Image (tube, helix red, strand yellow):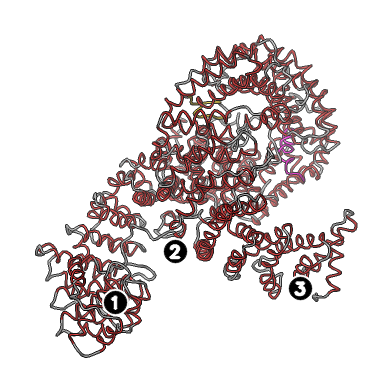
Amino acid sequence: MELSDANLQTLTEYLKKTLDPDPAIRRPAEKFLESVEGSQNYPLLLLTLLEKSQENVIKVCASVTFKNYIKRNWRIVEDEPNKICESDRIAIKANIVPLMLSSPEQIQKQLSDAISIIGREDFPQKWPDLLTEMVNRFQSGDFHVINGVLRTAHSLFKRYRHEFKSNELWTEIKLVLDAFALPLTNLFKATIELCSTHANDASALKVLFSSLILIAKLFYSLNFQDLPEFFEDNMETWMTNFHSLLTLDNKLLQTDDEEEAGLLELLKSQICDNAALYAQKYDEEFQPYLPRFVTAIWNLLVTTGQEVKYDLLVSNAIQFLASVCERPHYKHLFEDQNILTSICEKVIVPNMEFRAADEEAFEDNSEEYIRRDLEGSDIDTRRRAACDLVRGLCKFFEGPVTGIFSGYVNSMLQEYAKNPSVNWKHKDAAIYLVTSLASKAQTQKHGITQANELVNLTEFFVNHIQPDLKSASVNEFPVLKADGIKYIMIFRNQVPKEQLLVSIPLLINHLQAESIVVHTYAAHALERLFTMRGTNNTTLITAAEMAPFVEVLLTNLFKALTLPGSSENEYIMKAIMRSFSLLQESIIPYIPSVITQLTQKLLAVSKNPSKPHFNHYMFESICLSIRITCKANPDAVGSFEEALFMVFTEILQNDVQEFIPYVFQVMSLLLEMHKNEIPSSYMALFPHLLQPVLWERTGNIPPLVRLLQAYLERGANTIASAAADKIPGLLGVFQKLIASKANDHQGFYLLNSIIEHMPPASVDQYRKQIFILLFQRLQNSKTTKFIKSFLVFINLYCIKYGALALQEIFDSIQPKMFGMVLEKIIIPEIQKVSGQVEKKICAVGITKILTECPPMMDTEYTKLWTPLLQALIGLFELPEDDTIPDEEHFIDIEDTPGYQTAFSQLAFAGKKEHDPVGQMVNNPRIHLAQSLHKLSTACPGRVPSMLNTSLNAEALQYLQGYLQAASVTLL
Amino acid sequence: NKSDERMKKFKNKGKDAAALRRRRVEVNVELRKAKKDEQILKRRSISFRLLDENLNEEREKRNEIIQLSLEEIVEAVNGNNAELQLQATQATRRMLSRQKDPLINEIIELGIIPRLVEFLIHADNPPLQFEAAWALTNIASGTSDQTRAVVEGNAIPAFISLLSSPHMHISEQSVWALGNIAGDGPLYRDALIKCNVIPPLLALVSPATPVNNLPSLVFQVGFLRNITWTLSNLCRNKNPYPPLDAVKKMLPVLIRLIKHEDKDIISDSCWAVSYLTDGSNDRIQIVVDTGILPRLVELMASPELLVMTPALRAIGNVVTGTDEQTQAAIDAGVLAVLPSLLRHGKPTIEKEAAWALSNIAAGPSQQIQQLIMCGLLPPLVELLDKGDFKAQKEAVWAVANFTMGGTVEQVVELVRSGVLKPLLNLLLAKDSKTILVILDTISNLFRAAEKLGETERLCLLVEELDGLEKIEALQTHDNNMVYKAALNIIEKYFSGE
């Protein structure tokens, strides 16, 4: 492409079209631009346009297009063609910096990004003059230009904050320091001077403070990897100025906005980060400055207001103090009782207060409020920072801090008592303070696990928490109710059980509260209490203790789901699930109503599933209803099918992808409940389950395999007699699964069920083909997982069809194949098999090969007899071999089982582990001894001689142990 | 047997012990100021002759010393008048040895270096030889360019032959000058070695000057200090290392010097040994074979920072070597000394001690067992908790290596000693590598817990200690490997109910 006016014109037109809302115009234009971007001069045309176009929108569009072009093409990928010709590269690098600096801000940003993308590849080697070019602009005195340079430098250098130390990186940093550190320092000093000369000029100050923020950020990046010599030598300059900036205030820089942080806040916040960086990493060198910063930051905290815009600054500042006060050699800075008191009074307490913004969130954005308050996504909040400071101070000063706060708590409670409706926030702060003071360690599962012994939690609970929850109105002071419920929840392991039992009806009552936070917390608290463990690993709270409350609990839980804002409340649904699981058969009387409500809910949410956790617990609850009911009354399964199948059909027909795996799991559970022949309703569905489209989705595979296994278990005969034409389809599924490294184990599950349950005659004609398929996969891509499954399969086959049949089928594929399988796969790999049942299957199978397979005794296979026996003894006695060959370390996560995020397994639809050799063999070691004995009576003398010639001594000793235990001897 | 073999294969999962051990320098580029506790590379001769200097100043004040301009110096030095030559050389030396602003570059620019080198061989005029040697010593004490000016003036052979001067102070001044030249870097160090500097240098120490029978004259101890320092510079620097045969010649003398009583001599000879051990395993072996390790370990416990620092370095280097070399250091008693060094109070010492410990922890489980038996875990945990960041970083490596090579029982012991809390706290460190190493360590701990069926307990412990939320937060870390490692732990151990 020539750099011609005509081309500029064409480009302008196409750029304009890419902004068109109509895809029919936009898409072709985008396609066109993509098709020409490989041509020489294309980027230069864009640069010309963004500089000279008459229309501003074209300028901006050209700059964005240019940036994206650079992003896609600049990097030279090995073995791929260079997508930008060298002369264009040189021209871009020569022009982009001045162009960026002379452009208006909107375009400057795009070009600055482009520079950093180019810089990432070319800087410093292939762009040696970039730094000097940038540094020279510091002299310009034009802060629009200077800020452009600083912004670009920031985007170039910020990666120093997260990359690993390396020669290459440090060489670059050294180069940058040599060229940049001194000019940056001078600029810093000059800018600060200008700030005082322009102290009354608001617009100048804004520009200057933007520079200072960028300079402070650059300081952070350049000092991140290690303390550079230059900055150590100039620490005085930097730290003195940082310190004075921290204490600076200027009315002109204060903003009216309550939410958005202003320049002053951003700068101070960054300075806190810088000080924290030095305190953490360069303590030795920074020590002389640290006390000054502690004082400045503390003063800053005392004088900073409650507005949201200060939140980041305040939490950064508090975190700084928290990290310093934990260090033994700074202990003295905090030791004085007066200092401690004023930190508690002026820094901690004010930042624990319930603010207007919290109140708003509590009412209008309860989901966010709950997430922050319950799930600990509060890392950057003031309250959280204040809590961390409390815990930091408690490391050395637990006694004094507890003492100071106890006084506070009491006075706040008194304030509350005087006039609750006005002063309820005081009580909130008191509860929060007690909580943060008392908690030393906490987990989601157990709440607080270690508490401050100086705080009497039970007393506080009885005197100050219970009264609130006992009050007649569940809707009064909702924040305090939520606080109280949360208190029970997190201190559940500290408060004695009788108090918990007293609380249960109170919690059930609060399920009716209008406030979303309150009834959610009530549900969550109940759910947590129900999971607590007592002695003997049973639940702490028993079904008997809950007996008086069953009806009201279930009623209130389901009613809570009808409260505004909670129709898909996952906490409530989880509490329902947990209640079922705890109450067991006492819910049976309520099942008809429960299952109706659950199916209605299911029907409703299946229109647009949006809350995955809610849905998951709903299906779990359905499974529990089925299990609990059918355990007492197996015939009830029919009524569940009646209630559920209609909804299920609708889900399957509408292809509600999120729910289908759940439906298959519930169906498996239902099918497994049947004791007799498989019902015809299931058989009607069978052909549909084999449709390839269902198997395309990875999330469907595990539950579908499970369901097909249930079909085979319950209806193998029916399939063989009434649906024999579907057997090839079934094997087709197997074939598809076995071909995938990710799903091959699922294929084996299916195959094993076929072998175990189908009448042999019905699969006779396919058997050889199955083995051939397995061999093909073995040859093409052998993985440890495949081999493990393969070993289990062939041993199961051996158990089911006999060792001779196994040997014959291998040797029918290729002569001597059986020997190869023994030698190359079974003997060397058997140690890798994992799982109790799997090991047992292999043990019994190998025993059969050893003792019931004549060719093992009288052909060339005989030489493998002892090694096979030794491998079997190894399987019994040696630790499992969990090594993975090196090349398999690189199999993608997606390829290994257990990582299938699309599939959510239902705990309460769980399948009992199935042991196909269960009844046949109890103790596989004894079974081996007995089988060997039988073999030796058939051919006396042979077995002992084989053992004595080549079995190793250790194995022989083990074997003798088995023989003794079985009370047999070998003849 | 076979199962042992397999265990071995499993334990290191592709990394062998050598990769776990970390050599002293991972990066050759330094951003920091040169370490204050490093040995001095070059020295100017000022304070050493304080008396003389004071005397001169006195005399100068009284105008007893003739003041010469630079022009006059050039003229006199290039002239033939021996008296004036001496005066001028002395004036030059004085300019070069005053405390403030020695005029090194100005003197170099006079172009008189070749003449000064010539004066070195005026055996008939010892005062002139001495003044010239002193002046050149101080020029060589400057920057690399300044040292080069001396070398290019062909001073090396002249100084080497002066080593055997009958006048002790001239011989000593030459030792000093050669030390400065050797300290410039591997190039001049090897040039000196090629010119055969070692035999006459060693001859000054032995056998004519038996180390422990020296007359008690102060300047003679000073002389021996100078020799030791110059020897240490001949052992110093890498890329390349000093030639092996030179090392083998110097080593026996260094081993004798290390047994001296003077702490400066001990210090410099320890520095020399620390340079010799800062290399590949065969270099370490040469030092181990001398049997000096017990002495070095003894010196590690010295209250003198001057002595303890290089001794610790040397031992630290030895334990970067093979399992056998590390065992030799253990047998010499290093594990008994390390606890107090880990609690030394000076961050660089604690860091160095933790580094040594991390390399011992990279060894086989028997060595890890010895480490436990010698009570190293409590100070390690303390350091992890309260140490300076530099030392914490090394302590993290020590824990990481421990969990990589330790048996399940040993890992349990480690967790029992309270390592988890400070380790998890360091997930807030502002250093990606440290974070990644900690995450790997956590994975190792979980692997051990899985073997014991204690996964759930470890999960709870990690959560209680606020580790879980820190790991969760790392899922948004900008470093890809950190983010992946964090994600992996969360998915594997903390997802689901």
Q: Residues within 10 Å of mark 1 (few under 14, many from 20)?
A: many
Q: Which residue is mark 3?
A: A41
Helix, strand or loop status at disc 2:
loop
Q: Which of pointers 2 and 1 lies earlier in the amino acid sequence?
A: 2
Residue range in magenta is A696-710
In the image, residue B46 lies at what x, y percent?
A: 25, 67
Question: Would residue A425 be visible to someone looking at this image?
Answer: yes
The answer to whether A247 appears left or right of A954 in the picture is: right
Considering the whole magenta stretch, tell me its main secondary structure: helix
Q: Name the quadrant of the N terminus of chain A.
A: bottom right
Q: Nearer the viewer, residue A462 or B378?
A: A462
Query: In this rendering, would B245 be left or right of A88?
Result: left
Q: Chain of mark 1?
A: B
Residue B92, given in percent of the width and then of the height, sits at: 26, 78
Q: According to the image, label 2 marks what residue?
A: B28
Q: Amino acid at mark 3?
A: Asn
Residue tagged by mark 1? B192
Q: Is residue A704 highlighted in magenta?
A: yes
